């Protein structure tokens, strides 16, 4: 398996623009997680899905953030409009039954200028 | 929510030295994992260890669930061991709570 695949690896965008981050989880994993990592706040869970259904989005910072998982092999995290304080590394992770084989993608480094 | 504290926050070692990293947690857990974030930012799952002891090469981990702590041992450290080590736990839900990590630098 190729692991959890995220794209793009780097994204630089201007304030106010829409940003879409993509994730392909490991085949067979039934949980998918989106995290954000910053120096100040460390690793924060934004939202997670079980069998493509959003379970807890309490970590999503604002209405500007939205996430979807239309099928078992694809998820998106969208920020619209983006702001400089959204600059961070965004990780996607997947696991089996929430516990096993917890695997992170390589992350997307987002810079909003 | 559950609190996770890791110590030390920073550690500098000479290549070949051994080290012990500690993770304390504030409540009973059913999942504890150790991750290594390398200098390129990649997060690698090292151990799934809610209790007991596991070993993988030069790394081993022990979790004493009744006393709410876990230890990660690195023996004969190498420069490639550098990075940040995270402990993460959960206590009944499917989400992990991460500690702030221990930053390790192994110098040649």
Image (cartoon, rainbow, N blue to C red):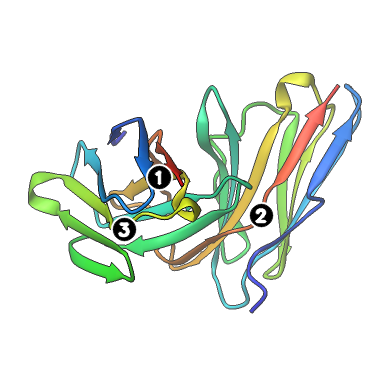
Q: Residue at x 57, y 40 (%)?
A: A57
Q: Are marks 2 and 1 on the same chain?
A: no
- On the image, the x and y values in percent for residue B42 come to 59, 52
Q: Secondary structure at mark 2?
A: loop
The residue where tag 2 is placed is A106
A50 with respect to A83 (left or right): left
Q: Residues within 10 Å of mark 1 (few under 14, many from 20)?
A: many
B85 with respect to B38 (left or right): left
Q: Secondary structure at mark 1?
A: strand
Mark 1 and mark 3 in contact? Answer it, CB < 8 Å: no
- On the image, the x and y values in percent for residue B65 come to 14, 53
Task: Give the numbered dot on residue B86.
Answer: 1
Q: Residue at x 65, y 66 (%)?
A: A25
Most distant residue in the front direction: B108
Distance between the Cα atoms at labels 2 and 3?
27 Å
Q: Are marks 2 and 3 on the same chain?
A: no
Q: Nearer the viewer, residue A58 or B99?
A: B99
Q: Residues within 10 Å of mark 3 (few under 14, many from 20)?
A: some
Vertical placement of residue A103 versus B21, above or below = below
Q: Secondary structure at mark 3?
A: loop
Q: Nearer the viewer, residue A2 or A30?
A: A2
């Amino acid at each position: 398996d190729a692991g959890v695949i995220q794209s793009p690896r780097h994204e630089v965008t201007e304030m106010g623009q829409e940003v879409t981050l993509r994730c392909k989880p490991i085949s067979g994993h039934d949980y998918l997680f989106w995290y954000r990592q910053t120096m100040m706040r460390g690793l924060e869970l934004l939202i997670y899905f079980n069998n493509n259904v959003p379970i807890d989005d309490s970590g999503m910072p604002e209405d500007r953030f939205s996430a979807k998982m239309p099928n078992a092999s694809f998820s998106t995290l969208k920020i619209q409009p983006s702001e400089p304080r959204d600059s961070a590394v965004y990780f996607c992770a997947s696991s089996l039954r929430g516990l096993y084989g917890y695997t992170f993608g390589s992350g997307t480094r987002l810079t909003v200028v | 929510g559950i609190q996770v504290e890791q110590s030390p926050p920073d550690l500098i070692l000479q290549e070949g030295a051994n080290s012990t990293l500690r993770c304390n947690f504030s409540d009973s857990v059913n999942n504890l994992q150790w991750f290594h974030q390398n200098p390129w930012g990649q997060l690698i799952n090292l151990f799934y260890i809610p209790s007991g002891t596991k070993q993988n090469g030069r790394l081993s981990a022990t979790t004493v669930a009744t006393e709410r702590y876990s230890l990660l041992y690195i023996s004969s450290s190498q420069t490639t061991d550098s990075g940040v080590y995270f402990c993460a736990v959960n206590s009944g839900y499917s989400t992990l709570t991460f500690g702030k990590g221990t930053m390790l630098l192994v110098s040649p």
